[in-house]
Amino acid sequence: MQGSGRRWVAVGLLGLVAACARPQTPTGGEVPETPLRVVETRPQAMEIVAPFDRSVEIRFERRVSERPTEGSLRDGIVVSPRTGEVEVRHRRTGLDVSMEGGFRDETVYRVTVLPRFQDRFQNRMAEPYELFFSTGPELEPNVLAGVVFDRLTLDEVRDARIDAVPEVGGAPHSTVSDSTGFFSFPHLPSGGYVLVAYEDRNRNREPDFEEPQDSLDVQLARGDTLVVTELALLMPDTTAAEVEAVAALDSLSIGVTFDDYLDPERPLEGIAVEITGEEGESIEVDEIVHARTWETRREPDAPDAAPDAAPDAVDPLADPEVEPDVDPDPADDPVDDPAPADDPLLPDRRIVIVLTEPMRPEVSYAVEIDGIVNLHGLTGGGGSGIAVGPEPPEPDDPDADPVDLDPDDVDADDLDPDDFDPDDFGP
């Protein structure tokens, strides 16, 4: 009997577990599918309040996840101006944002909630949320805006950090560019600023030497709407461009690659070049052009395409960092052919030296270059290298068999009697 009882208890427990494992309809109402929204803040938007040490409260319409879609909680909040270290704490339906030293007197604050927060159903914010409030001064109707782009590719830069640093001193105002590279500073107090844009790769909220960056001085008057488009991010550099490679492209052209990029809109003037052969003979330079110009001239429909280029030769101008179909060509260089209107002028590391007379085949020529200006405007670049004159193209084979024509393939209607000379035929 005891054994039967134990079997009955075991069967009963299995039935209970099976019943508990049955799928159940979720409770708590329908699952929301709309983007997460901020519904309340403290202080309120555009409110003028006394200085305070408590947190700024951001409340959402639904419970917010503790994990942003990228970065940390702190990375999802931008407080401007930064008058102290910022801390972000998670609450069930919101965030508390505090700053070391509190929110000071006589300051217009901007708290930006980036669209990196989501609810527990993974419905994220559709756009940033901006909270403006003041601890004294009136909010001025000013706007400073612009676009940040990559200097090498001309692509807009997403999530670039932009600091507006007051010229008279004080904490910087900060914001982050959106997916189109656009940024704005509404209600920025009038005055002079140094606008600094950078990719904050290490997230220390400072422009470091290892990060692409750019800066610009601006003046903002009361009631101004100022838009800037000159913020082009580029890695800092303190050295002039140096020659990295030299090679003959054909008997009349020598390609040179530098370790720095060059400005496609800067005319290639003031560059000194000396070309000396093995026996001390020199070759004069006809012109110096950007690589894009030389490549354009060699296209099949170009009237001055060079006839003696080696088709199987490795292109010494090939630059893995720049796609060939978007190489630059300076529009204002009188010796350069203008690029198509829809083709952007991208920086390039390459130039071509066009000679007045051909190099001798398989003869080494020393090439000395000076006066190169890199993309940062640093002068004094140059260097040296060796170019070897290419072998001439092979002539047509005079012993090649003539082409046999089948009389059946010739249409008599296509023959013109005036095209034939009787002297061309034998007796």
Image: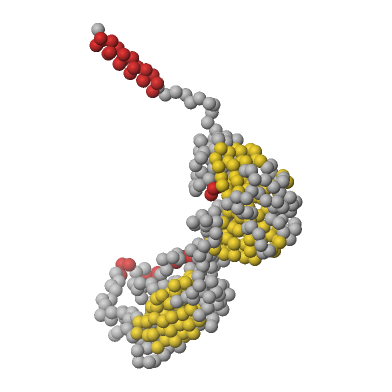
Number of numbered tags placed on the structure image: 0
Q: Tell me residue 317's x, y (percent).
A: 41, 72
**Residue sitting farthest toward the top:** 1
Q: Is residue 261 above or below residue 68?
A: below
Location of the C terminus by quadrant is bottom left
Q: Tell me residue 396's x, y (percent).
A: 31, 79
Q: Residue at x 43, y 77 (%)?
A: 243
Q: Tell me residue 364's x, y (percent).
A: 35, 85
Tell me, yes or no, if residue 48 can be seen here.
yes
Tell which of 325 and 77 is nearer to you. 77
Q: Residue at x 44, y 65 (%)?
A: 321
Q: Residue at x 52, y 71 (%)?
A: 375
Q: Is residue 95 above or below residue 346?
A: above
Location of the N terminus by quadrant is top left
Tell which of 260 and 117 is nearer to you. 117
Describe the colour scheme in one phrase. secondary structure
User: Horizontally, is 374 left or right of 3 in the view?
Assistant: right
**Residue sitting farthest toward the bottom:** 280
Tell which of 123 and 361 is nearer to you. 123
Q: Residue at x 40, y 76 (%)?
A: 245
Q: Tell me residue 221's x, y (percent).
A: 73, 61
User: Horizontally, is 422 left or right of 135 in the view?
Assistant: left
Tell me, yes or no, if residue 329 can be seen here.
no
